[in-house]
Image: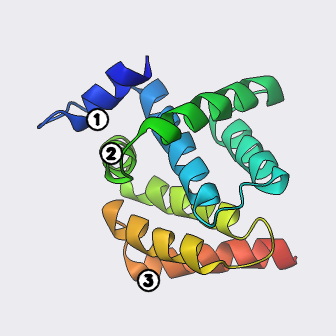
Amino acid sequence: MFADFLKRLTAPDPDPLPELDARLALAALLVRIAKSDGDYDQAEIARIDRILAKRYDLDPVEAAKLRAQSEALEHDAPDTVRFTRAIKDAVPYEDREGVLEALWDIVLADGERDEAEDALLRLVAPMLGVTDQDSALARQRVEARRSA
């Protein structure tokens, strides 16, 4: 399953991914962001599950299954570009700002802005076609929700 998915992502001129694959790409990107500081903890795992459940209207078991699949995919994927390209092709710009909010939510899940997570997110935002300004606004919205 993952080999076929990665093959589609690495094709020279890939077709847009079906919705299910775009979900998997987003989930894998959330996992990659969470793991980027070398500490993939329960708070981040729970946050990923909640984001997936809310974004895709999944029950907790379905969200956990999607996250588990994405963990395997993230482990096998050689780089982040494949995920961002799949998301960029499948998600309209205004919804990509929501993707950035989800990514910032993971970065801030443990209450700290780790340098490795922050650096990866600064690379991912332009790959998703989101401006630095819109990424900063997405971060500010997440921070405001967390402090409310």
Which amino acid type is shown beneath numbered disc 3? Gln
In the displayed image of the protein, which residue is found farthest to the right? 148
Identity of the residue drawn at 58% across and 70% down = 117
Identity of the residue drawn at 46% across and 76% down = 134
Query: Regarding mark 3 in the picture, which secondary structure is present there?
Result: helix
The residue at which mark 1 appears reads as: 9
Q: Which mark is residue 82?
A: 2
Query: Regarding mark 2 in the picture, which secondary structure is present there?
Result: helix
| Residue 64 vs residue 93, the one in the foreground | 64
Which amino acid type is shown beneath numbered disc 1? Leu
Identity of the residue drawn at 48% across and 25% down = 20
| Residue 60 vs residue 46, the one in the foreground | 46
Image spot of residue 118 (x, y percent): 55, 76
In the displayed image of the protein, which residue is found farthest to the left? 12
Image spot of residue 5 (x, y percent): 36, 25
Label 2, label 3: how far apart the Cα atoms are: 23 Å
- Camera-near label (3 vs 1) is 1
